[in-house]
Every structure is written in structure tokens, then in C-alpha cells.
Image (cartoon, rainbow, N blue to C red):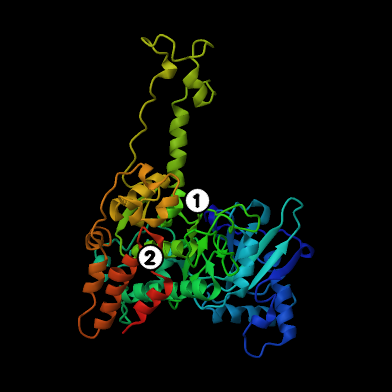
Amino acid sequence: MSVDDVPVDPTPPENTRRLVGGVLFRRGQLGVHGTDPAIEQEAADDIVTLATTSRLTPHSGGLCSDVYRTSLALDSDNGRGAPPRSLLGELVERHAGTPGQICIKRVTVEDQCRPHSVELEVSMLERLSHRNIVLLLAAVEDTSDPFGTVLDLHMPLYPATLTDLLNDPCFAPSSIVATLDQDLDVQRHRPALSLSHLCSTPPRRKFASFAVSLASQLFSALAYLHDEQRIAHRDIKPDNILVSADGTVKLIDFGTALDLSSAAPSAAGAETGPGRVGHAKEGSNGSGAVFQVGTGCFRAPELLFAPTDGYDAFKIDIWAAGVTLAHLFTALETVVEETEEDDEDDETWDDERVQEGDDRPSWQRALWDDDDDEVTTMGKDTSAPPSAMTAPPPPPPRAATRGKRGYARAPLFAGSFGEIGLASSIFSLLGRPHTAAEWTESTTFQPPLHRLPFPPSSPRPFAEIVEEKLVYFHPALDELDRGGEGKMRERLEKLVLVAIREMLVLSASKRCEARRVVELLQQE
């Protein structure tokens, strides 16, 4: 058993915990047929103590949170009887969660970095009601620590994230799956295997069906958020999209979401849009728009240049969703993850090359000669450099079989080299406009368009991008015959050749809206 699999003992005492949000707090929202108010109250009381009476197992984590999972099974000494957990279990199953299981997102309020806000996340989730948005069962506040308040968000547990599916060799067009190693015996955890039925036969389900269904559900949620609730998620990515056993998509993590339902009008003369975030709109303290939202390669280009008049928050959701859906069709690449044994061997090798009796840190060994205490500087005679300044021997070669081998999707844009690297990657495909007239938002960029460290270039034809980057698109089409599956073929073509193309446009004002994608994929 690895360290990650060891259950943790939750310790907050019961009398410091209270229910502050969720459907169990606002019990009129339960929607469970025939529930008795007394049973509802018991369930509410029970979930407050759930984290203190059950074993929590680490499940995942985020920038400002830790996520645990736990069973709803009653402890033998609980004494509450079956009804409270039965009500919770019914809520979980009604929302396509894993039966008998829930997850707990734990956040220390004081440790959050702007713009993360678990309090706003709770208030938003309480008012949202959509089959493709996660249900907040309960929010429990714990004040046992005098140095910080902890909020536990209880939600149904789902088998896998979209990231799990994208990186698994069973989620690809059938002709591609046949060429991939499905054994991967060195990978210890493949949650996507439990969902392989979603795009395999029998029954006759295809990767194309899965891709179109996922896109339809994701944009159904986004259209609801943008048009009905006036909420921008601002961190759309595969990690924040969960998939249930029946294929239901659940959008999670509203920690950086922005409520624009009561946003003030933009300043006079400023470019406006339905989701425009100006410097006076972000937060109640008037501290200005926050550009450090989104994650890595899913960040919209305008976020990289901090426009002085803000940005359209709805359109950064559209961009991020477009990149996310594009990753359904990028190639699976073999990756090797270093194991703990590899790390230990590296440390051992480093220790072995340290001279016996010399316990100085490596930076001290590099600066001070072993023979005297005189500091080595650039001004010294370098004709005979001291031994401590010579290059260390190269590390021993690694065996080819070391590490855990697996797969990962090739990113559409390079997000691992910082903002400049991401911008360069975006411009290499979509071009860097020659004038601000071609990219209206760039007039307020910092620096302005003409001072960006990238030469002007023309966009590449989208068909060329599909051929080079979205290499699983044509194999997905090929597994659909032109007869009985012609309609699915048309929907897949609309998803990639129309919808994704309209999402991935440099100018936010020219990107499509969420309802446009919903309508496209619903057309017969």
C-alpha cells in the first residue's frame, strides 16, 4: 500500500462543526420524493459528523484544497440507524454518483489565494440546478483550529475525470486502440477502465458517440451558466470535468467562478460584452480584474496580456472548452513517470559522490576549495581551477525499463513553458495579427500588440491544424459508416470542423457562444 492509499484520521471535534450550506442545509431543495422532515434533519445532523466518524481516504488535490473520499456505510457504534445515510445515498444515486460513496473537498479559508473563494463557491453551487453541474450535498464549517477555519464540501463521488479518460488507451477510436498497449501493467491505477463501456462494443457504442455526448453535455452546462445564471466558470479543463458510470458529465470546481448577474455596466467608451470583466468589477473591494485564472494550456490568449479594460469572462470559458474538446482528438503519447525508487537512487548516487567526511551542502562545496577556506570567485586565476569547481561526473545511465510507463494526450498548445511559451504556441497555429484592427482586444494589451515579442504571421488553415494536431478525428469518422450512422458522422464533423474552429478564435468577440454549440450538436 502506498502513502497515498493510507486512510487519514479526521480529528475535528464534533462540537466545532456546523452545517452552513448545501441541499441538506436548504432542505427544501432536496427533491427526494416523500422525504420526512425529521429524516432530513437527521441526515443533516449526520453529515456534520461524517468526517469525524468515518475514515477519509486521500483522493486528489488542488491548488487550495484537498479531496477525500469516504463511504456512507454506517458505523456499527453510530447508533443513528439507517435512514439518514439512506437519504444521502438516494441523493447520490439520483445525481449519478458512485453508490454509497461521497467525496469531501476540504479547504482552509485563510489559505486561499485570490481569486479562489470557497465561500463564493458554496453560494453559487447552492443556487445552481443542472444535471451536468455537481450537486453540493452539504457544506460543513469547522472552527476547531484557532488559526484557521476549514470548510468541507460534501459531493457525490464519480469514477473518473476527463483527464483520466483522455490519458487512457481504451478511450480512442477503435483503429487507434488496436495499436496501443492495453496492458500497462506498470500503471497501478486506471480509473478509466471502469468507464470503457462508454465508447466500446458491445453495445455498439463508438468513440465518436462519446465525444459528441461529452461536448453536448459540457456546453449544456455552460449555456445554463452563461445565459441563465450569468456565471463564468473561469477554469474549464479536463480535471474539472467528471464522468459517471452512465456517461453523465459533471462540471466541478467553482472556486474561481465569477458571478456577473449583478455586475455594474462597463466604463463609458469601453468595449462591452455579456461577460465583460472590467477593473471595477472583480470582487467587492474594487481591486480590479484578475487575469491569473484558468490553467496552463487551457488559458485564453487575452489573459496573457492583461488588457487594461478587462476581458469577457464568458469567452475565456469558450476558449478553454474548445481546447479541452480538441484534446479528445490529439494523439496519445507514451510517457514514463519516475518512481520513488528512481528518486531514491538519484539521492544515493548524489551522496556517493560526496567526499567522505565532507558534509557540506553542494553549494558550499562549489564555492569553497577543499584545501583552504578562501572563497572561490570569478576574479581568481582560472588556469588551474580548484577541484571543487570542476564539473561533477555524469549520472549513471537509466535502465530503459525504469519508471511507470503510461500515456498522456499531446497538448494542442504548449502550456508548460510559461505565458510566453503558451502565447508563442498559440500564435504558431492561429497566427499573430499584423494590426490591432484584426484583434480588437489587443488595443488595451500590456504590452500593446506592436510591442509583443512575436513577429506577425498568418493563421494556418484549420484543415491543416486538424491534420497535424487532431489526428484522431479522421479515425473517429472512419469507424462510422455512411449509412445508419450518417447522422452521428455529421454531428462529429460539426463538433470539430465548425464548433471547435469557432471556439478557438484569437479575438474573444468573434468566438461563438455556448448556446451556439448546443444548437449545432442538436441539429439533425
In the orientation shown, which residue stands out farthest toward the bottom? 34
Work out whether residue 409 can be spotted: yes
Q: How many marks?
A: 2
Q: Could you say which disc has been placed on residue 263 in the image?
A: none
- Name the residue type under label 1: Thr
Q: CA distance from mark 2 to mark 1?
A: 20 Å
Quarter holding residue 163: bottom left
Quarter holding residue 515: bottom left
Dot 2: within a 10 Å radius of its alpha carbon, few (fewer than 14), some, or many (20 or more) residues? Answer: some
The residue singled out by tag 2 in the image is: 511
Side (left or right) of 220 relative to 202: right
- Name the residue type under label 2: Arg
The residue singled out by tag 1 in the image is: 308
Dot 1: within a 10 Å radius of its alpha carbon, few (fewer than 14), some, or many (20 or more) residues? Answer: some
Percent across and percent down for residue 33 are: 62, 89
Work out whether residue 190 can be spotted: no
Whether 13 is drawn above or below 19: the answer is above
Quarter holding residue 486: bottom left
Side (left or right) of 508 relative to 96: left
Q: In front: 409, or 14? A: 409
Q: In front: 440, or 5? A: 440
Q: Secondary structure at mark 1?
A: loop
Residue shown at 48%/63% (left/top)?
Answer: 272
Percent across and percent down for residue 254 are: 56, 64
Q: Nearer the viewer, mark 2 or mark 1?
A: 1
Q: In front: 180, or 30? A: 30
Q: Secondary structure at mark 2?
A: loop
Residue shown at 52%/10% (left/top)?
Answer: 372
Residue shown at 33%/36% (left/top)?
Answer: 397
